[in-house]
Image: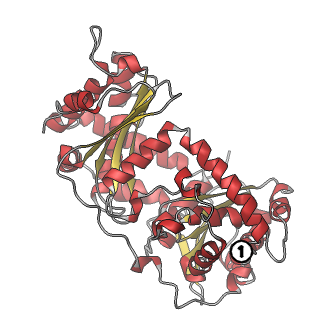
């Protein structure tokens, strides 16, 4: 059995060129390290229509070759031959390159990562090929009803900010001038600068050794670029408030199930209410004894799956309740009240009566257990550390192991009821329904109006 370490401290360093390092011990004896590089460049930094989708595209192009490793296979082979996991993802606020490998291969992984991030060649013929690949990816996304729900949520609840646009979308690839070589290269050179980049490492390798590895890598070959504004100086504005519930009823051919989402605009990352909302998220739909699961599935047999999410960004956030069902079970019928009315009843009950003491006790036990399990996952801590220190410039990161005791243990029923009444209101609400067989907006509105505060 792996032995858990009691040392939860994080060590940080900012190199002369502005590149950041945050390091933490794995906490157990398995010789596995997580090495994540965060670039403060996401879709919110694309300010012109002609530039949409470039952050995602640059992520793809960084796997296509460098001066030293000329072909894509030269990038991937060093990872494949050691059995390492490598991937990358582009988000609203950042791009992340992820490697998980044995401790003895961390130096090699840093060398390859730093080369591909700083020295990608962006060959024109590779750009043309990858345009087709990215378009195929967006076609796949367009087939996913959850993508359309997510897009509708951000368009409604983040109106007036760069968050309202998708990270990538098939509409970005309809013009022959999309992902133009000059624009792609311009944004790559602007944002892939050392002061916009940092590395989060969770490993058994000592901090001093990791620091030396980075000092001898291509991450140090580029000086700080004073003309590239840091992320902290370009936070997007607050979303435009809306006076009433917003709706998106999307008919999608071939989607047999009806997907339902009810979301509410909430607060930004790091706000004190975010922690109460996280507990509320689990009470509502985070585990098998949650309100959504026990009511929709166990009491009425209306759905197979349901969930709840609390998302927080630099300027705002949202709280989402979601489920899917047979189209015939969405509205009220002779046998049961239907999914929409059940969801409204659940919202009315928690708004009026709050949560029980048992629910509070249970959700804290659930959270505490989840964080203990997370201690065994180096990538979980690696992501958390990177977001806090590199993305949000938090100079004093609370170690992952102390998150529960620091932010959640003292939350009360009054705190949770407070965020319910503050955020779960019709003027903050967005309702989205996607499927081939969807009701009219007028019908949906009639059900949702029964949510009374």
Work out which quarter of the rendered image holds the N terminus and state it. top right
Q: Which residue is mark 1?
A: 114
The reply, left or right, for residue 397 in relation to residue 88 is left
Q: Residue 341: horizontal and vertical position, in percent?
A: 25, 24
| Residue occupying the point 42% across, 42% down | 149
Residue 151 appears in the rendering? yes
Depth check: give the residue in front, 52 or 204: 52
Work out which quarter of the rendered image holds the C terminus and state it. top left
Up/down of 307 relative to 221, above or below: above
Q: Residue 171: horizontal and vertical position, in percent?
A: 53, 53
Residue placed farthest to the top in the image? 334
The reply, left or right, for residue 398 in relation to residue 104 is left
Give the structural element (helix, strand or loop) at label 1.
Answer: helix
Q: Residues within 10 Å of mark 1 (few under 14, many from 20)?
A: some
Up/down of 131 relative to 182, above or below: above
Q: Residue 127: horizontal and vertical position, in percent?
A: 72, 65
Q: Residue 360: horizontal and vertical position, in percent?
A: 29, 39
| Residue occupying the point 32% across, 30% down | 291
The reply, left or right, for residue 424 in relation to residue 185 is left
The reply, left or right, for residue 170 in relation to residue 424 is right
Up/down of 259 relative to 191, above or below: above
Depth check: give the residue in front, 373 or 87: 87
């Amino acid at each position: 059995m792996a032995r858990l370490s009691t040392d939860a401290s994080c060590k940080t360093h900012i190199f002369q060129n502005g590149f950041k390092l945050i390091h933490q011990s794995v906490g157990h004896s398995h010789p596995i390290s997580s090495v994540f590089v965060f670039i403060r460049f996401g879709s919110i930094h694309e300010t012109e229509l002609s530039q949409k989708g470039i952050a995602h595209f640059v992520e793809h192009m960084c796997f296509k070759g460098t001066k030293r490793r000329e072909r894509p296979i030269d990038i991937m082979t060093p990872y494949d031959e050691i059995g390492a996991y490598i991937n990358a993802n582009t988000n609203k606020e950042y791009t992340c390159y992820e490697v998980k490998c044995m401790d003895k291969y961390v130096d090699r992984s840093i060398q390859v990562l730093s080369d591909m991030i700083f020295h990608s060649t962006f060959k024109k013929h590779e750009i043309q090929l990858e345009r087709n690949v990215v378009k195929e990816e967006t076609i796949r996304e367009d087939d996913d009803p959850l993508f359309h729900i997510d897009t509708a949520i951000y368009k409604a609840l983040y109106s007036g900010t760069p968050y309202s646009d998708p990270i990538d979308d098939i509409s970005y690839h309809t013009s022959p001038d999309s992902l133009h070589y000059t624009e792609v290269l311009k944004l790559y050179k602007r944002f892939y600068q050392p002061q916009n980049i940092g590395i989060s490492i969770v490993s058994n390798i000592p901090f001093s050794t990791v620091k030396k590895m980075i000092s001898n890598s291509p991450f140090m070959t580029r000086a700080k670029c004073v003309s590239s504004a840091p992320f902290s100086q370009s936070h997007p504005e607050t979303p435009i408030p809306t006076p009433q519930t917003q709706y998106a009823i999307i008919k999608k051919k071939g989607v047999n199930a009806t997907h339902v989402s009810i979301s509410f605009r909430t607060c930004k990352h790091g706000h004190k209410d975010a922690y109460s909302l996280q507990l509320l998220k689990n009470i509502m739909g985070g585990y098998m004894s949650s309100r959504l699961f026990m009511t929709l599935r166990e009491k009425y047999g209306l759905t197979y799956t349901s969930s709840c999410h609390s998302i927080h960004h630099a300027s705002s956030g949202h709280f989402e309740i979601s489920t899917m069902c047979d189209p015939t079970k969405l509205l009220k019928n002779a046998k049961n009240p239907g999914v929409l009315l059940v969801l409204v009843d659940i919202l009315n009950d928690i708004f009026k009566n709050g949560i029980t003491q048992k629910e509070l006790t249970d959700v804290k036990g659930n959270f505490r257990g989840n964080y203990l399990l997370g201690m065994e996952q180096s990538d979980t801590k690696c992501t958390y550390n990177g977001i806090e220190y590199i993305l949000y410039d938090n100079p004093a990161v609370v170690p992952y192991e102390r998150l529960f005791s620091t932010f959640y243990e003292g939350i009360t029923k009054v705190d949770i009821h407070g965020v319910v009444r503050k955020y779960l209101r019709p003027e903050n609400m967005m309702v989205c329904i996607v499927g081939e067989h969807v009701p009219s907006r007028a019908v949906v509105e009639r059900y949702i109006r029964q949510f009374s505060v």
